[in-house]
Amino acid sequence: EDQVTQSPEALRLQEGESSSLNCSYTVSGLRGLFWYRQDPGKGPEFLFTLYSAGEEKEKERLKATLTKKESFLHITAPKPEDSATYLCAVSGGGNKLTFGTGTQLKVEL
Amino acid sequence: DTGVSQDPRHKITKRGQNVTFRCDPISEHNRLYWYRQTLGQGPEFLTYFQNEAQLEKSRLLSDRFSAERPKGSFSTLEIQRTEQGDSAMYLCASSLGETGELFFGEGSRLTVL
């Protein structure tokens, strides 16, 4: 069964203080690893897809990387509007995504 | 608005009652998914449709849960004889083709008293 573990559970940063979120996964035959952002009371919003080890994707202050066992979401010089829960998910076959429990990020002025 | 819409946004019901949620996906998307999310957890897969065919169901989906997608357009998720453990956010998502890029609605929050 596919498994996703995210750490830390919560992270508090000062504006401009860069950091990384971790996503460790176990899957038989990775078809894709996905990062989503979720704001309180809203549905998740797609950010990135990574397919193979060594792949990187960037969007504004976010960069996602992938190895054979984990993925990192690097946040460079975050702003308060980056505050959200960041969810990692994997697709190992079939048509479902298996999500982690997320990292709740709070960026303060 | 061309996003995924869900109705109702909030539903409070008493234990034992039946509830139904509706999802209108993005019009050109052929795939539709239902997920359930409880506080502090990530979304859990419930079921998936390709057009009008329900192709996959989670073991989480007990026989009290039923989902339909008539004519491959909107979908409904019905929960019969609700239990307090059914309290959660029910999320609908759609996609075009086989992709993990899902477009989620804002969810229907169910509270069972």
Image (cartoon, coloured by chain):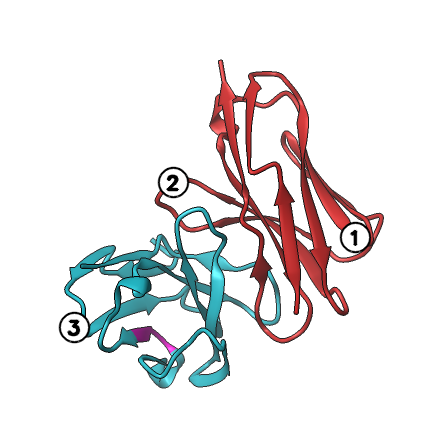
Chain colours: A red, B cyan
Q: Which residue is mark 3?
A: B17
A108 displayed left or right of A22: left
| Element marked by disc 2 | loop
Residue B65: x %, y % from top left: 33, 78
Can you see residue B32? no
Q: Is residue B74 magenta?
A: yes
What's the residue type where badge 3 is placed?
Gln
| SS assignment for the magenta stretch, majority | strand
Outermost residue to the top:
A109
Sort mark 3 into few (<14), some (14-19) or many (20+) by Cα contacts within 10 Å: few
User: In the rendered view, would you say A61 is above or below A14?
Assistant: below
Residue B101: x %, y % from top left: 58, 58
Q: Disc 2 sits on a residue from what chain?
A: A
Q: Disc 3 sits on a residue from what chain?
A: B
Q: CA distance from mark 2 to mark 3?
A: 28 Å
Residue B40: x %, y % from top left: 44, 46
Q: Residue at x 57, y 69 (%)?
A: A96
What's the residue type where badge 2 is placed?
Pro
What's the residue type where badge 1 is placed?
Lys
Q: Residue at x 42, y 76 (%)?
A: B61
Q: Are marks 1 and 3 in contact (CB under 8 Å)?
A: no
Q: Please give the label number shown on residue A40.
A: 2
Q: Are marks 2 and 3 in contact (CB under 8 Å)?
A: no
Tell me which segment is drawn in magenta. B73-77
Nearer-N-terminus badge (2/1) = 2
- Foreground tag (2 vs 1): 1
Q: Which residue is mark 1?
A: A69
Along the line of sight, the residue nearer the viewer: A63 or B59:
B59
Q: CA distance from mark 1 to mark 3?
A: 44 Å
Q: Disc 1 sits on a residue from what chain?
A: A
- Foreground tag (2 vs 3): 3
